[in-house]
């Protein structure tokens, strides 16, 4: 095959650009796969990948080239992608970032993985994440990254002494550093949006139930949702179109909503679009650099014809205690299956069954996971269920109602993703509550099950944080992903923050 693209240019192409180049045979899927495998190896110090299998990847790429040659290519045929290590895969190990699942090989693929493969995408490998998706910094992984001998935190390519955000930090870093054109992530309380913001990429969490949870290692079942991470809204639209769709036979939380082409309205005008600005998102605690970048982005939206509408989400502050009651409660139930009996880690020495359970779980789980299991078990225990868990569920409904009241006045909601830019590695390791507070703006939408996304809108100009990316969050009403992607795309047509790249990558 004659290649008109230089190999060095491949990693600069987005998903849609690469799909076009592959379809027109300017480059082969095998060449693209080889290029990204080489890049991931060259930048192994970032700790993004936890498993690769070049033989499997190149076989998938060769099959994609054959389909392209036969004229039976899918919409994303031959485009490489990497998956968060929370999705089970047949051909790659699935650990969920935990010692508990070290070396585990699933007998099946997650639905999200299968659907992207059906669209023609080629899997590069599995990406690092906080253990069982619990964390806001990606410092909680217990698995050694590819090329490293021991567990290590994922490093932000914009500043390798900074965290990438979590729990989908490996996914965000791989996209930002051009180690893959796209990646999958999961968002329980902001784990797509926050790392996307911290790494200067685009990521979207769809309406809860839009994407199948089958084959996603469970953390909090009423909150976990899969979504794509890429460099642009255009790319995320193509990926989300492949990911979403009903899966009722395998996922009881899957919604019976038809598959949708989210790219169809990307270029629609946003003249007259009402953007709600919640006052609670711009109060004390929001850093000046984030505030200024988001305000500048909102001013750009006004230039594009949108109208800013002041709104209120009065129970925003309650989202943190509510989330950190409900999510740990569900985690304590979901993680009870990891007991050393059927699969996963088992303690080598024990006296009886109860002792095996205790030692297996103590050895297999990390500190953050143990902390959340303990909290969850406590709030579900006799005498505390009514006082904590039941009250949290009632407030969760009120938070959802606040959004519905706001959407009577606006079409979508905008604000910061996080109060600050990415912090330094280890800076909050001894203070889990400080980590939890970083989710203040993403948790309300997650508790309500709403779609939300992060869009790059600038960089910090302060001395201590200079050059770190800043994202803006867009939140839509149920099933309004197309509207979010349209608003994000029109903004990205007018700005270039999403094409900026970290030095050296």
Image: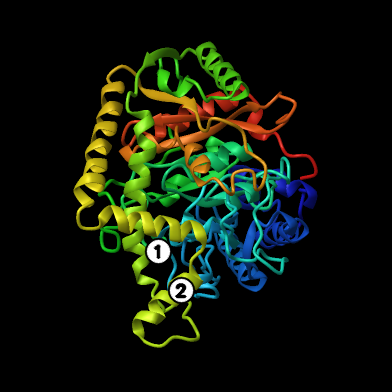
Contact (CB < 8 A) between labels 1 and 2? Answer: yes
Q: Which disc number belongs to residue 48?
A: none
Tell me, yes or no, if residue 196 can be seen here. yes
Q: Which disc number belongs to residue 106?
A: 2
* Mark 1: secondary structure: loop
User: 210 or 1: nearer the eye?
Assistant: 210
Give how far across and how far down residue 312 sits, in percent. 35, 19
The picture quadrant where one finds residue 52 is bottom right
**Mark 1 surroundings within 10 Å by alpha-carbon count, few (fewer than 14), some (14 through 19), many (20 or more):** many
* Mark 2: secondary structure: loop
Please tell me which of labels 1 and 2 falls first in the chain: 2
For image coordinates 68% across by 45% down, the residue present is 156
As drawn, is 175 to the left or to the right of 71?
A: right
Tell me, yes or no, if residue 220 can be seen here. no
Q: Which residue is mark 1?
A: 215
Give how far across and how far down residue 115 sits, in percent. 43, 58
């Amino acid at each position: 095959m004659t290649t008109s693209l230089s190999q060095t240019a491949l990693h600069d192409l987005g998903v849609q650009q690469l799909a076009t180049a592959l379809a027109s045979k300017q480059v082969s899927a095998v060449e693209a796969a080889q290029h990204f495998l080489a890049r991931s190896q060259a930048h192994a110090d970032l700790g993004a990948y936890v498993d690769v299998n070049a033989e499997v990847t190149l076989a998938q790429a060769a099959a994609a080239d054959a389909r392209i040659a036969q004229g039976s290519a899918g919409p994303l045929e031959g485009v490489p992608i990497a998956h968060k290590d929370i999705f089970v895969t047949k051909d790659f190990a699935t650990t969920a970032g935990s010692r508990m699942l070290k070396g585990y090989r699933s007998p099946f693929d997650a639905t999200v993985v299968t659907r992207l493969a059906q669209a023609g995408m080629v899997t590069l490998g599995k990406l690092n994440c906080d253990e069982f998706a619990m964390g806001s910094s990606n410092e909680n992984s217990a698995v050694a990254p590819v090329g490293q001998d021991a567990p290590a935190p994922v490093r932000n390519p914009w500043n390798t002494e900074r965290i990438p955000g979590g729990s989908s930090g490996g996914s965000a870093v791989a996209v930002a550093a051009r180690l893959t054109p796209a990646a999958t992530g999961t968002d329980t309380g902001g784990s797509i949006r926050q790392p996307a913001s911290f790494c200067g990429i685009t990521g979207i969490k769809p309406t809860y139930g839009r994407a199948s949870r089958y084959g996603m290692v469970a953390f909090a079942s009423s909150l976990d949702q899969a979504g794509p991470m890429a460099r642009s809204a255009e790319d995320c639209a193509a990926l989300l179109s492949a990911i979403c769709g009903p899966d009722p036979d395998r996922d009881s939380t899957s919604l019976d909503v038809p598959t949708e082409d989210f790219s169809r309205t990307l270029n629609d005008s946003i003249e007259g679009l009402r953007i709600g600005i919640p006052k609670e998102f711009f109060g004390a605690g929001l850093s000046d650099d984030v505030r200024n970048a988001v305000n500048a982005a909102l001013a750009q939206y006004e230039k594009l014809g949108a109208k800013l509408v002041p709104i209120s989400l009065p129970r925003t502050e309650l989202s943190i205690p509510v989330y950190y009651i409900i999510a740990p409660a569900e985690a304590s139930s979901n993680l009870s299956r990891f007991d050393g009996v059927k699969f996963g880690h088992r303690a080598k020495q024990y006296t009886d069954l109860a002792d095996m359970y205790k030692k297996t779980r103590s050895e297999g789980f990390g500190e953050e996971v143990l902390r959340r299991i303990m909290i969850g078990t406590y709030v579900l225990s006799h005498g505390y269920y009514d006082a904590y868990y039941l009250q949290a569920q009632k407030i969760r409904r009120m938070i959802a109602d606040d959004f519905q009241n706001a959407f009577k006045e606006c079409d979508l909601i905008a604000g910061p993703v996080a109060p600050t830019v990415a912090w330094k590695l280890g800076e909050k390791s001894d203070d889990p509550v400080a980590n939890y507070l970083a989710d203040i703006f993403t948790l309300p939408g997650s508790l309500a099950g709403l779609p939300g996304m992060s869009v790059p809108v600038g960089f910090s100009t302060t001395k201590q944080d200079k050059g770190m990316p800043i994202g803006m969050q867009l939140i839509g009403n149920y099933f309004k992903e197309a509207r979010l992607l349209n608003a994000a795309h029109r903004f990205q047509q007018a700005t270039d923050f999403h094409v900026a790249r970290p030095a050296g990558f």
